[in-house]
Image (tube, grey):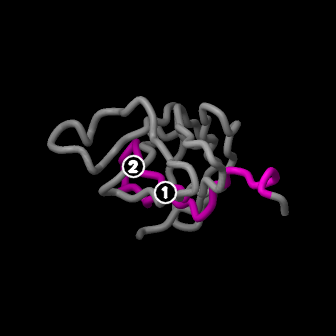
Amino acid sequence: MSAQGKRVAASGSWVQLPSSGQTQAMAFVSIENPTMYGIYVTAASSDAAGKVELRDGGQAGDARLKPVEFISVAAYESLDMGPNGPHLMLLDLKRALKEGDKVSLSLVTDNAGTLEVSAIVRKE
């Protein structure tokens, strides 16, 4: 594969099993950016949620509970989302999620198109 053919890719995605009755869940995706340009994830959506927010669990205090404008992935770097760092918050869940369920996630980037990924619901 030529350097030109390298594309930003999303993989290893999963959704944290929400507690019974919860209407939101955290979702995590690994994003690999083999290109020479940094990218920004600017929006996200899911078939399982009415709304998806970008969040950063690395922020202090209440800031970690508020949406951020973007999640960046530097050139030639990769990002593994986690509860204490950047992640997606699925809000207004449309159905009860069970362990093993599949959830579709779409991540919109500023210059690498939309990354489509299927996430598995699991406890940890």
**Residue 107 percent across, percent down from the top left:** 60, 41
Q: Is residue 93 left or right of residue 63?
A: right
Residue annotated with mark 2: 86
The answer to the question of whether label 1 and label 2 lie on touching residues, with beta carbons closer than 8 A, is yes
**Sequence order check, earlier mark of 1 and 2:** 1
- Give the magenta-colored segment's residue range: 3-30
Which of the 4 image quadrants contains residue 23? top left
- The one of 27 and 87 positioned closer to us in this rendering: 87
28 within the magenta span: yes
Of tags 1 and 2, the one toward the viewer is 1
Residue that carries the numbered disc 1 in the rendered image: 79
Badge 2: how crowded within 10 Å, few (<14), some, or many (20+)?
A: many
The outermost residue toward the right is 1
Amino acid, disc 1: Leu
Left or right: residue 87 compared with residue 111: left
Kindly state the secondary structure of the residue where label 2 is placed.
strand
Vertical arrangement, residue 113 with respect to residue 10, above or below: above
Judge whether residue 8 is colored magenta: yes
Disc 2 marks a residue whose amino acid type is: Pro
- Residue at 65 percent across and 56 percent down: it is 34
Disc 1 residue crowd, few under 14, some 14–19, many 20+, Cα 10 Å: some
